[in-house]
Image (tube, rainbow, N blue to C red):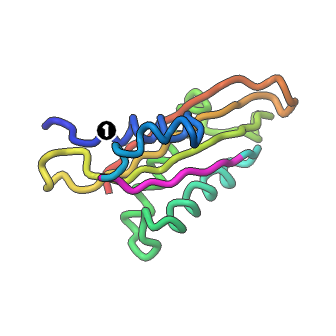
Amino acid sequence: MSQRIPIGKIAILLCALTEEESDYFRESLEEVKYCQGRVGSMNMQKVISAVETAAKRNGLIHDSLYRETHALYHAIVEAIRGVTRGQPSIGEMSRTVGLRFSVVRGKPYINEGEGEWVSVAFYGTIGAPVKGLEHETIGLGVNHI
């Protein structure tokens, strides 16, 4: 099947670009729901919670539907693996992150039967908890709802 809306690409662009830069892509966003946010922490649960809270507050997932929360959780964890280079831990390894994130929900396939999907992307820094010793990182997770 061909893709209609590249929700992963949209998620990456939304988290990597500034508000002003992302204005160029507003027309591409008409068929999807999305939100953006920031999180900085040495605690993985705080990162996960920040994304879940933003998605719920912006109506991207329904709090009362387990499958939606579950799909979002798996997309977050997949994206965190990219940020952490496959080692999904930060504080335990004396690392800290400063991330921008985006959550995108849409129908990426022409066949409506494929349903909705959710994408989570992170862009920012990871490194030792010493200002100036971090480096860039990015992660992407995509999951069906």
Q: Is residue 103 visible?
A: yes
Q: Say left or right for 142 vs 22.
A: left
Closest to the observer, 32 or 43? 32
Residue carrying label 1: 6
Q: Quadrant of the C terminus?
A: bottom left
Q: Amino acid at mark 1?
A: Pro
At x 50%, y 65%, the residue is 58
Q: Residues within 10 Å of mark 1 (few under 14, many from 20)?
A: some
Closest to the observer, 92 or 49? 49
Closest to the observer, 16 or 143? 16
Query: In the rendered view, would you say 62 is above or below 109?
Result: below
Prevailing secondary structure of the magenta residues: strand
Dot 1 falls on a residue whose secondary structure is: loop
Q: Splitting the image into 4 quarters, where does residue 125 fall?
A: top right
Q: Is residue 78 visible?
A: no
- Residue at the far right in the pictured view: 130
At x 71%, y 38%, the residue is 97
Residue 26 covered by magenta stretch:
no
Q: Splitting the image into 4 quarters, where does residue 20 fall?
A: top right
- On the image, the x and y values in percent for residue 127 come to 75, 28
At x 76%, y 44%, the residue is 42
- On the image, the x and y values in percent for residue 41 come to 75, 46
Q: Which residues are magenta?
A: 31-39
- On the image, the x and y values in percent for residue 9 come to 39, 35
